[in-house]
Image: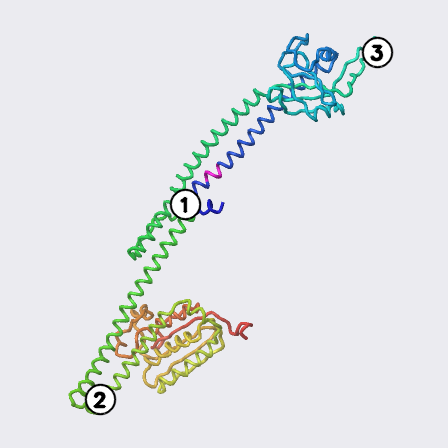
């Protein structure tokens, strides 16, 4: 059985579906055919039993004495004067099993214990059974008590029939025509069932082929993607259809679209990273070559120039390290992030970021008004995002300017009094490697606000940059949370 199941599982889906449909139809047809055969058999046997009951009626009258007079151990096959066709078996059975056959009986029927029990117990209902005659032919048998009708006395009511003790009357009828009818019916049902199973199998195979056509297209599309890495392929799907195959096709199209977008972003990230790395690397190589040539030629560089070159090399290495750190932050997977998410006090995170911002802009005045707020986020990433927002405010604030920070009900605002961002540039401020033309000379990789947007979005919030009334820029961060920590973290 296990080997058969393994072979079935190894078949293609359409073959398995056709086999399943054929098996289900075969089971249903077999159940209906068997039920039909048994119902017809029961009806036919009921008619035979009725014929037997009617045939036994004359034998329960006074004419039974003629049957007794003509009863022998073997059928005589001659006319006994009984007014009945020679189509029935007629014999007497005694309680010890001895039987005698009426001379007009069709033949001799083999008796059994049931016949003897009727003769012995005189069951008034009699017993129906199926047996065989002396030639082995099937017969339907009715064995009933033997009754003798007494002659009535003039003027007296008819006396009740007298039961002959230890004797029974056996009447039987051949089942040849009944069995032939049942055999013909069985053959007909078998042929119809076989044709039905074959038609069901063919229909199941046709339905499976038609139903799996979209799956074939999906398979071809997957194989095409695996072979060519072409993520632009799409599977045609009926937008109004809601079946499983249509949903699968739409899911595949969505997946390839997402993969294509991710691939494009990856290529764009590589291209942008290469472009951003080229400038500091070129400058760094130029400065190092100047220092190396000075050492090789023995022509020392003036101390001031040498100090400036070394400072430039240090600044460029710092810029490269910051750029690489930003790239690593952007490249981190969602799974790695999810393992470090916890309940974070946004108030404490803002305070820590403010301390770092005050060190980077000691000439600025940074005022803060923060209230408690707890969010679910990655602590280090959230602090870095807020530091990036404050760094932008410090970078673009005029010397001696003011930065205003407020945190109320999960809304963090950072307002500077710098030159602001032109309206046409606002849609691009969160793009990777995008830098305002007016800020190209300032240090930075162009990834800071992109990291801010991704971190806030992962925490379930949103961040926006808008013009401030009276000049400057306002960065607004909204994060879902509560003013008190959850009970399990309190």
Counting from the top left corner in percent of width and height, residue 389 is at 37, 76
Q: SS at mark 3?
A: loop
Query: Tag 2's secondary structure?
Result: helix
Which residue occupies 53% across, 33% down?
32
- The quadrant of the picture occupied by the C terminus is bottom right
- State left or right for residue 310 relative to residue 134: left
Element class at badge 1: loop
Of residues 418 and 155, the one nearer the viewer is 155
Residue at 31% from the left image edge and 65% from the top image edge:
266
Q: Nearer the viewer, mark 1 or mark 2?
A: 1
Question: Badge 2 is on which residue?
Answer: 306
Question: Which residue is rendered at x = 28% and y = 66% of the image?
Answer: 268
**Would you name the residue on which mark 3 appears?**
156
Q: Residues within 10 Å of mark 3 (few under 14, many from 20)?
A: few
Q: Closer to the camera, 41 or 173?
A: 173
The answer for how far apart the CA atoms under marks 2 and 3 are is 157 Å
**Are the residues at dot 1 and dot 3 in contact (C-beta closer than 8 Å)?**
no
- Examine the image and state in which quarter residue 318 appears: bottom left
> Answer yes or no: do the residues labelled 2 and 3 have beta carbons within 8 Å?
no
């Amino acid at each position: 059985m296990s080997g058969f199941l393994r072979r079935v599982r190894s078949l293609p889906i359409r073959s398995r579906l056709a086999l399943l449909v054929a098996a289900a139809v075969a089971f249903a047809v077999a159940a209906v055919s068997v039920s039909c055969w048994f119902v017809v058999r029961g009806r036919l046997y009921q008619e035979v039993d009725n014929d037997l009951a009617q045939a036994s009626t004359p034998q329960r009258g006074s004419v039974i004495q003629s049957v007794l007079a003509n009863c022998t151990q073997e059928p005589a096959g001659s006319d006994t004067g009984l007014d009945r066709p020679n189509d029935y078996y007629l014999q007497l059975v005694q309680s010890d099993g001895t039987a005698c056959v009426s001379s007009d009986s069709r033949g001799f029927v083999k008796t059994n214990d049931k016949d003897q029990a009727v003769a012995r117990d005189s069951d008034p209902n009699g017993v129906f059974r199926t047996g065989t005659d002396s030639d082995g032919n099937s017969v339907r048998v009715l064995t009933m008590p033997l009754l003798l009708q007494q002659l009535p006395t003039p003027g007296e009511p008819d006396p009740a029939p007298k039961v002959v003790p230890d004797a029974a009357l056996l009447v039987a009828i051949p089942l040849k025509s009944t069995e032939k009818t049942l055999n013909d019916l069985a053959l007909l049902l078998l042929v119809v069932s076989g044709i039905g199973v074959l038609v069901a199998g063919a229909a199941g195979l046709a339905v499976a082929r038609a139903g799996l056509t979209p799956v074939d297209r999906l398979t071809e599309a997957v194989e095409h993607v695996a072979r060519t890495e072409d993520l632009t392929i799409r599977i045609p799907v009926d937008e109004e259809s809601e079946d499983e195959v249509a949903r699968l096709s739409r899911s595949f199209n969505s997946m390839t679209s997402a993969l294509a977008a991710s691939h494009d972003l990856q290529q764009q990230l590589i291209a942008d990273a290469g472009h951003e790395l080229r400038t500091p690397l070129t400058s760094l190589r130029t400065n190092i070559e100047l220092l190396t040539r000075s050492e090789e030629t023995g022509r020392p560089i003036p101390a001031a120039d040498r100090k400036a070159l070394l400072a430039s090399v240090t600044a460029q290495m710092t810029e490269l390290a910051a750029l690489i750190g930003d790239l690593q932050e952007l490249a981190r997977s969602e799974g790695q992030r999810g393992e470090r998410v916890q309940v974070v006090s946004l108030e404490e995170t803002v305070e820590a970021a403010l301390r770092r911002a005050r060190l980077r802009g000691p000439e600025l005045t940074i005022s803060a008004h923060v209230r408690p707020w707890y969010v679910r986020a990655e602590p280090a990433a959230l602090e870095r995002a807020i530091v990036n927002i404050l760094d932008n405010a410090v970078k673009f604030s005029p010397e001696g300017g003011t930065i205003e920070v407020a945190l109320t009900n999960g809304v963090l605002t950072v307002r500077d009094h710098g030159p602001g961002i032109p309206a046409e540039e606002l849609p691009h401020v969160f793009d990777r490697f995008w830098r305002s033309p007016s800020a190209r000379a300032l240090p930075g990789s162009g990834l800071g606000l992109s990291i801010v947007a991704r971190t806030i979005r992962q925490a379930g919030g949103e961040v926006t940059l808008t013009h401030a009334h009276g000049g400057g820029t306002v960065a607004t961060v909204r994060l879902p949370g509560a003013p008190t920590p959850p009970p399990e973290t309190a």
